[in-house]
Structures are given as C-alpha cells and as structure tokens.
C-alpha cells in the first residue's frame, strides 16, 4: 500500500473517532457514535497490518485474540457500580502499552524509521522519552486510583511532610534523566526513566482522597491521551497524534468540570489532602441539637401526600446498589400521579456521569434525570427532596459559611423544598468532614439505614 | 512512514494543535449524562496506540522489540475490546428508556 493510501485510511479512521465523540452529544446518536469508533479502530488496525514490514500475522492475531478475550470478558462481567475502577484499570493499560511501544521503538528504531540503534534521531528520543514518562505515570497513577476505588487501598488521602517538594524534585530528576538519555541513548537510563516515572505516578495520586477520584480518573484519562500523542510524535503518525489530542482534551475538560463542581482549582485537587481531617468544631456546636428521625413508613406517608418529589442520589446509593429499589419506589410514586425527577450533582459518585449510568441501568428514563443547572430552580416549588447517599452536595454551608472547606461549591438547593428526607447510614459527616446543618432542621427527617433496604421498605409501605 | 525531519515534526505539531481544538469543541458538546460513556470511548480509542505495537511486532523472528510490541498489542486489545464493549453496555441502557417515554426534554 502506498504511503498516501495509508495516510488517507488513517485520516478516515481519525474522522470516525471524532464522530464517535460527537455522537455522545445525545443518547439517541450515541450508539451510532460508538459504532463509528469501532469502525475507525478496525480501519486503523487493518491498515497497519497491510504494511510491508508487518509479516507476523499469526503472532499479532494471537495477541489481539488474547487481549480481546480478556477485555471482552471483563467488560461483559463488570457490575455497573464498579465502573470507576474498571475505567481506572483500563487507563493503566493504555499507559503501560505506551511504555512498551516506546521501548520497542527504542530497541528497534529501524522498524519505525527513526534511525539506528545507538544513533536514534534526537527529536525521536525526546518524543519517545516524553511518551514513556507520561505513559508510566498514567500506569502507576491509575493502578493506585484503581486500588483506592476498589477499596484495596484506603481511600483516605495519605499526606506526609515535604510531599510536594519530593514530587517536584523527582520531576526535575526525570528531566535530567531525559537529557542524559538523549545524549547517550543508554537502555539503563531508559528503564530508570520508566521506574522513576512509575514512582512519581504513585506519589501524585497518593494524597488524593476518595471523593476527589472523579477528578483523578478524568486526569488519568487525559494523561493516557497525551501518552498516545507522545508515541504519535515518535512514530510521526498523525492518527495517533489526533486521537491522543482528542482523548487528552476530553480528559482535561472533564477534570475541569469536576473541579468546578467542587469549586476548587484542579491544582488544589491535585495537591490533595482534602477531606477527612478537618476540625470538628462545627459538629460539636450541633451535638445538642435535635435530629428528627423517621422510618420507612413515615417516608412513604410524606411522599405519598406530595405532588412532586426530587430524588438526589449520591455515592452512597452506588455503594448500597440501591438504584433498582429506588427506581421501583419512583415508579410507584409516579403511578400515584406524583412528579418524580432526579437531580444529579456534577461530582456525585466516583466518576463523571456515574449516577446517570446507574440510574439508566435501573431503567430510569433519562428525561427524568436532570443536571444541577436544569433543576436547581425547581426546588422551591418541590414538596419533597429525597436525598439518598449524598451529603456535601446538599450542604447549605457551601453558601453561607465562609469558613467551611466547601464554601463556594455549587449545591443542590434541597433546603428550599418543603421537606427533606435524608437516607443515611449514620450521622457521620460527608467526605469534606463538614457537618450538615440540614440534618437539624425542622422540615428534615433522617432515615437511618442501608439505602437499598430503606428503599425496599418504603416500596413495601407504599404498596401496602 | 517517511523519515523524521523537522518538517515532519512541524506537520505533527500542526495536526496536534488542530486536533486539540476539535477535541475541545466536540467534548464540550457531550451531554453531562453521557460523561461515563465518554470515558469508555476515549479509553478505547486511545488504544489506537496498537498501531505502534503492531509495527513493532511486525518483523519476523523474535527479538526484544518484537516481544515488547506483542505485549503492547495484548494490552491495547484488552482496552479496545473492553472499552468499546463497556461503552456499548452503558449506552444500550440509555437506549431502553426511549421506547418507554417518547417525549424529549
């Protein structure tokens, strides 16, 4: 195949990837988008297999089959609640693949037309080492994020002295190593870059707490794109550059949206250490206040007599796998002629769009699921807010208390509805460590218990 | 693939920046409800890095580079199949609803 033909096929593939993302602007067009993506990938792979230098079809075919089988198996088996972990795990693989491709290019530069062993072109060496560096960080950062999301590693931020200084020094060390690598092209230095970058990836994610994971997952998404870009530059392959840039931009925008949802800068999130250990002065003030506690029957009674209910789900719903029971509850209320809608905060859950997927899994029509901007002005006209497994995103302190760590964060105005039902396991504070004054209001009823169990009990009371 | 010269690099850089701009606008148009599938798709397409891995695994015989290439092909394939499939699963859940409720927002 001529190099022009290759370039055109790669261009078609890149365009299909752009359409794949474009399709996601609406659920209706999204499935077609995904198909565009698949076609684009098939074109890219087959075009590459047509290269004259590519001869070992059996080995490559076997490798694709092995990887494909593993990937399909995991993707079909995974629980939707475990999605954030899965995405983190997949990101780590992109990072690792980037490192291996860079290593392959380093050991056999002739196959990529970037020079000969020991005399690889300087530009290629720089691009290669940058690709390796980002790839390795993506790998280890994602592995750690996976551990935190899966619960194998504590989700609490781990902070220690001079953390940021150490990270900065390691970063400088990597730059120094890259310069050294460009000068002497030594394999030892190449692998040192890999190892030190892996270390840096761990250190960068370690101080970031569980609920900041949406930002981390998005950031790693972005990194995996930039890693692909780095490799694209090394191989002078426009398809890789375009795709890497698309993915990089996508991850960066998601990180931005998530940080904005918490009224924090990306830098602040990345520096980490947020949550868990704020002083408890606020909660002490409230220790003598009275909390109105209710049970499933009370909740059923309150909602049955309402005209409109807005359900505010949070990570707690995901943990308790309560989405199906919740939808059942919503269905009964709808049958009673009550308007039921769902309000999603941008940072609810552990990855962007997490709640939407879970509700979709439970067959909640997406028209009933609204974003913060779309629904926030409706709370004053709403009778009941049903908050399930969310806390900080409803805390009015974000508006009123300037000393609060969450001050300035956009919140869902559940306080403005006539009554609020809070499904929670205990009085424990949310991720930010801040007490929620809403718990003590007269129109708030606390429903203590497991979110799924509570919904099931409410369903029972409603149908009784 | 042609030789690596400064010209090639500048072309790559041009492509890079234009792609970033396209990415910026396309991603902002993605509805927030589909941000999880977006991550699934970007995950899958970033594994287009498999192209590099195939080139490394291409030559006959076995050497270090080829082994690295094959490992790269396996890793990227996990992602390609896994990423597209999990996205498909997510999107098909969003699909079911439309049958029930015909109205648009």
Image: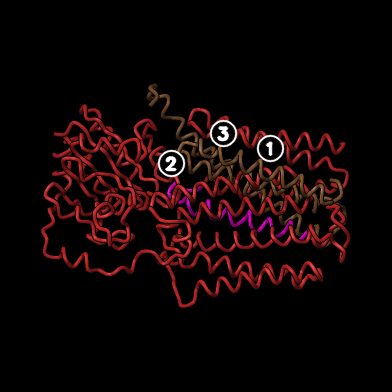
Chain colours: A red, B brown
Identify the residue under disc 3: A22
Q: Quadrant of the N terminus of chain B?
A: top right
* Residue under the point 22% across and 68% down: A281
Q: Position of residue A461 (x, y in %)?
A: 17, 40
Residue sitting nearer the eye, A199 or A58: A199
Residue sitting nearer the eye, A14 or A322: A14
Rate crowding at label 2 as few (under 14), some (14 to 19) or many (20 or more) other CA atoms within 10 Å.
Answer: many
Q: Quadrant of the C terminus of chain B?
A: top left
Between circles 3 and 2, the one closer to the viewer is 3
Number of marks in the image? 3
Mark 3: which secondary structure?
Answer: helix
Q: Position of residue A334 (x, y in %)?
A: 25, 30
Q: Chain of mark 1?
A: A
Relative to residue A304, is residue A75 depicted above or below?
Answer: below
Identify the residue under disc 1: A14
Q: Which residues are magenta?
A: A78-104
Q: Position of residue A85 (x, y in %)?
A: 49, 54
Identify the residue under disc 2: A357
User: Could you tell me if residue B81 is visible in this image?
Assistant: no
Rate crowding at label 1 as few (under 14), some (14 to 19) or many (20 or more) other CA atoms within 10 Å.
Answer: many
Residue sitting nearer the eye, A407 or B31: A407
Left or right for A38, reference B88: right
């Amino acid at each position: 195949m001529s190099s022009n033909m290759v370039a055109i096929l790669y261009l078609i593939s890149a365009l299909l990837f752009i359409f794949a993302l474009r399709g996601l602007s609406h659920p209706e067009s999204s499935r077609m988008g995904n198909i565009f993506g698949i076609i684009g990938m098939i074109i890219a792979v087959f075009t590459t297999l047509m290269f004259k230098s590519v001869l070992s079809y059996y080995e490559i075919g076997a490798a694709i089959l092995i990887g494909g089988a593993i990937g399909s198996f995991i993707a079909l088996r995974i629980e939707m609640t475990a999605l954030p972990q899965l995405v983190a795990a997949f990101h780590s693989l992109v990072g690792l693949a980037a490192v291996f491709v860079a290593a392959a290019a380093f050991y056999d530069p002739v196959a990529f037309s970037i020079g000969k062993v020991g005399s690889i072109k300087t530009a290629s060496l720089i691009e290669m080492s940058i690709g390796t560096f980002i790839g390795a960080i993506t790998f280890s950062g994602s592995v750690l994020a996976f551990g935190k999301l899966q619960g194998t590693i504590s989700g609490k931020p781990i902070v220690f002295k001079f953390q940021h200084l150490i990270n900065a020094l390691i970063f400088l060390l990597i730059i120094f190593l890259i310069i050294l690598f460009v000068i002497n092209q030594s394999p030892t230095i190449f692998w040192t870059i890999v190892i030190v970058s892996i270390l840096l990836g761990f250190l960068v994610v370690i101080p970031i707490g569980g609920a900041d994971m949406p930002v981390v997952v998005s950031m790693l998404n972005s990194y995996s794109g930039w890693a692909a870009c780095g490799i694209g530059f090394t191989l002078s392959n426009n398809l890789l550059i375009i795709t890497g840039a698309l993915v990089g931009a996508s991850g960066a925008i998601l990180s931005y949206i998530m940080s904005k949802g918490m009224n924090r800068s990306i830098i602040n999130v990345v520096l980490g250490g947020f949550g868990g250990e704020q002083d408890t002065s606020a909660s002490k003030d409230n220790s003598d206040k009275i909390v109105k506690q209710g049970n499933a029957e009370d909740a059923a009674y309150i909602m049955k007599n309402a005209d409109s209910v807005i359900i505010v789900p949070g990570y707690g719903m995901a943990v308790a796998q309560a989405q199906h029971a919740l939808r059942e509850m919503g269905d009964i209320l709808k049958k009673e002629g009550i308007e039921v809608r769902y309000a999603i905060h941008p940072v609810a859950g552990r990855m962007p769009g997490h709640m939407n997927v879970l509700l979709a899994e439970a067959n909640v029509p997406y028209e009933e699921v609204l974003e913060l901007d779309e629904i926030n002005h409706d709370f004053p006209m709403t009778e009941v807010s049903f908050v399930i497994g969310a806390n900080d995103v409803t805390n009015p302190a974000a508006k009123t208390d300037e000393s609060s760590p969450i001050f300035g964060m956009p919140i869902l105005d559940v306080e403005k509805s006539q009554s609020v039902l809070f499904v929670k396991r205990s009085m424990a504070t949310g991720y930010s460590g801040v007490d929620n004054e809403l718990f003590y209001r007269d129109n708030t009823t606390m429903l203590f218990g497991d979110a799924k169990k509570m919904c099931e009990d409410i369903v029972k009371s409603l149908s009784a | 693939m042609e030789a690596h010269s400064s010209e090639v690099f500048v072309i790559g850089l041009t492509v890079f920046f234009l792609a970033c701009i396209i990415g910026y606008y396309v991603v902002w148009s993605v509805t927030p409800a589909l941000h999880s599938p977006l991550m699934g798709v970007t995950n899958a397409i970033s594994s287009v890095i498999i192209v590099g891995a195939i080139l490394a695994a291409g030559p006959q015989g076995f050497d270090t580079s080829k082994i690295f290439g094959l490992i790269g092909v396996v890793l990227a394939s996990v992602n390609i199949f896994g990423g597209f499939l999990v996205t498909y699963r997510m999107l098909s859940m969003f699909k079911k609803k439309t049958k029930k409720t015909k109205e648009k927002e």
